Amino acid sequence: MNIDCITGGKPVSYVPIFGGERKKSADQNYEPVIFYLLPMTVEQYENSGELLRRVDEDSGEATWRVKPENVDDIFIRHVAKIENLRVAGGETIGDGKAFADCRKTASSAFAPLFMEILAAVRDVSVLSEGMRKN
């Protein structure tokens, strides 16, 4: 079996569910928050510790878990660019490092977005079932 580099090292754009961004992006006049994610290599994935995503069957709520010592490093290394994200004071957050720095002093309201993006990094780094079958 041959496994090729799917993205060729190019970032994958991701509009988060957090804050209704994905729904709002249906309006062509709205500029959603967009994260540009770099997939992990096999080595990076293995060294990161498993990013776990669980969905509660009753509520449909998704939760994520990762080794605490790895979260900032993963975020900084794999969020290449962020568009249209600002904090309350108007400061623009333009990449993973700026987000990781900001979250240290921001309210816990950023936590679900942070965890969603970590899960998205994992998702873009793993072959989908359709790709595994081909």
Image: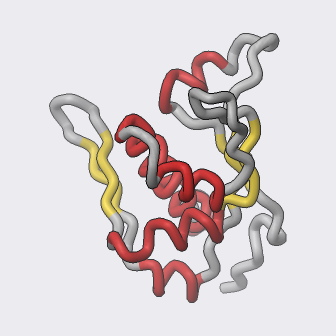
**Which residue is at the front of the view, 80 or 1?**
80
Q: Position of residue 35 (x, y in %)?
A: 68, 46
Q: Quadrant of the C terminus?
A: bottom right
Residue 130 falls in which quadrant of the image?
bottom right
Going by the image, does 82 lie left or right of 45? right
Most foreground residue, 30 or 101: 101
Q: Nearer the viewer, residue 107 or 68?
A: 107
Direction from residue 38 to residue 105 in the image, left or right? left
Classify 13 as above or below 74.
above
Q: Is residue 56 above or below residue 131?
A: above
In the displayed orientation, state which residue is furthest to the left.
58
Residue 129 in sight here = no
* Image quadrant where residue 29 sits: top right
Residue 109 location in percent, x, y? 39, 35
- Residue sitting at 83 percent across and 70 percent down? 8
Quarter of the figure that contains the N terminus: bottom right
Residue located at (39% from left, 41% from top): 112
Residue 36 pos. (x, y %): 73, 51
Q: How many marks?
A: 0
Residue 98 image offset from top left, x and y in percent: 65, 55
Whether residue 82 is visible: yes
Q: Residue at 63% across / 16% down in the picture?
A: 24
Residue pictured at 54% horizontal, 57% vertical: 100
Along the line of sight, which residue is nearer the eye, 118 or 1? Answer: 118
